[in-house]
Image (spheres, helix red, strand yellow):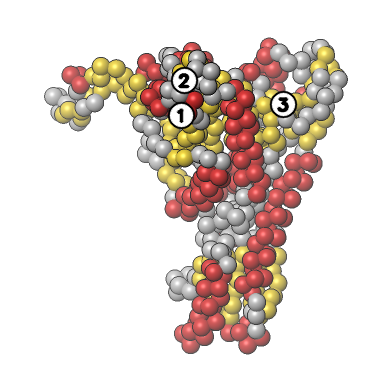
Amino acid sequence: MAKELKNLTKRSENYSQWYNELVVKADLAEQSAVRGCMVIKPYGYAIWEKMQRQLDDMFKLTGVQNAYFPLLIPKSFLSREAEHVEGFAKECAVVTHHRLMNDPDGKGVVVDPEARLEEELIIRPTSETIIWNTYKNWVSSWRDLPVLCNQWCNVMRWEMRTRLFLRTAEFLWQEGHTAHATRDEAEQRAIQMLNVYADFAEKYMALPVIKGIKTANERFAGALETYTIEAMMQDGKALQSGTSHFLGQNFAKAFDVKYINKENTLDYVWATSWGVSTRLIGALIMTHSDDNGLVLPPHLAPIQVVIVPVYKTDDQLQAINTVVNPIVANLQALGVTVKYDNADNKRPGFKFADYELKGVPVRLVLGARDIENGTVEVMRRDTLEKHEAPLQGIEQYVKNLLEDIQQGIYDKALRQREAMTYRVDTWDEFKAQIEKGGFLLAHWDGTTETEERIKEETKATIRCIPLDAPDEQGRCIYTGRPSSRRVIFARNY
């Protein structure tokens, strides 16, 4: 383990390679036998479970219920909403047959030509179509509304360039789909879920985000409006970390989902969809971690505290066990996840390196002399600082320390974002600064043509139009045309 840690590429040398190595060495995930798909290992999945559990609770507080819809979608469904099919057509995996057979030439297994499906099926890239076809059976009156459903599932998008967690062909996510009686209700729900995502990112991931609206060019296929939370990674690139879409009546019209309103007339329902994925684990890694390994915010760390004994004899270990066991029980009673690693399979130094690599927020080290002195060595992972603390009351001390670490990690990320956010007013300034990374606040003339030209020339995209952006008269950095507010440009993952 110490050798592996020594070989971890430094961020300053190759940020991309550092990320790829860290995901594997910290036992989060690895490549699978299927191109572009990953195996999420137990430690990585434990982080996703904590995210899932917290988000699920937050969704349910807004009235959302979980459901499940089919993995396979009839191909004809996608063609009903023109923008939707155009947006996903190139990423779809298609099921054409339902049976295999032995190759008559003895070359293994082949598709049975007699088993071709009457209608081809799409492995879901997203579920709007299958869900709205279902909602048609659920909604007939205003009394049936709103419908507030979410599903936790996997989806498949045939990505050509993949990277663990950030962009894989198959990934895990949640997708919420709601149906409403009025436009206003649907728009309010879309914004409400955006705020849920932002609260989760900042309070649990310690990830400062900017809430904004996507441009028409970056909007979700089939949506009237896409709201987003955008985060900055340590290398200055942006990562879209969650989106919430106001779909209008597009999918209701495509699947004929109507209801009788209070005025006793027939109308189409209004819709939203919203989602976050295992990409959030990538955001967690790239925002907080360092050259020594992962740095995990305590609110999402699978192990918040590890206790490592240092001893020479079995008698010393028994004495340490006697002291540590009640500490473990008391920490658990305070809601802290703690591991007491007294296994005799590795030297303490190897354990220290392992837990440091895996980003455990707090490490306690206890030996015979510490017991005599009534103290314990405490190390916080975010700063790597060590100090001694009294054994008496250590449980509450650690509980408070975890909250201090959570806040400290957030504050550090926020300071970095602020230091790497720049106001630019000319095209020359823009081109020079985008090479250095960061968020660029610049004026834009509002046209898709200009947006695409800037992307083509600099690889920078408009991440969002910030919801809190003030009105400010200016000139587009590319065309010189009038602009009434600044937008955020950045290169992105």
**Residue closest to the eye, 182 or 356:** 182
For the question of whether residue 157 can be seen, the reply is no
Q: Secondary structure at mark 3?
A: strand
Residue found at x 52% / y 57%: 302
Amino acid type, label 3? Ile
Depicted 404 relative to depicted 129: above or below:
below
Query: Comparing marks 1 and 3, which lies closer to the viewer?
Result: 1
Mark-to-mark CA distance, 3 and 2? 34 Å
Residue found at x 51% / y 71%: 340
Q: Local crowd at mark 2 within 10 Å, few (<14), some, or many (≥20)? A: many
Residue found at x 51% / y 39%: 64
Q: Does residue 334 appear to the left or right of 73 in the view shown?
A: right
Give the numbered dot on residue 259. Answer: 2
Q: Using the rendered view, name the quadrant where residue 301 is placed.
A: bottom right
Mark-to-mark CA distance, 1 and 3? 35 Å
Q: Where residue 262 sits: x, y (%)?
A: 53, 22
For the question of whether residue 195 can be seen, the reply is yes
Amino acid type, label 2? Tyr
Q: Where residue 123 sits: x, y (%)?
A: 38, 27
Residue that sits furthest to the front in the current view: 263
* Disc with the residue nearer the chain's start (3 vs 2): 2
Q: Local crowd at mark 1 within 10 Å, few (<14), some, or many (≥20)? A: some
Give the numbered dot on residue 144. Answer: 1
* Disc with the residue nearer the chain's start (1 vs 3): 1
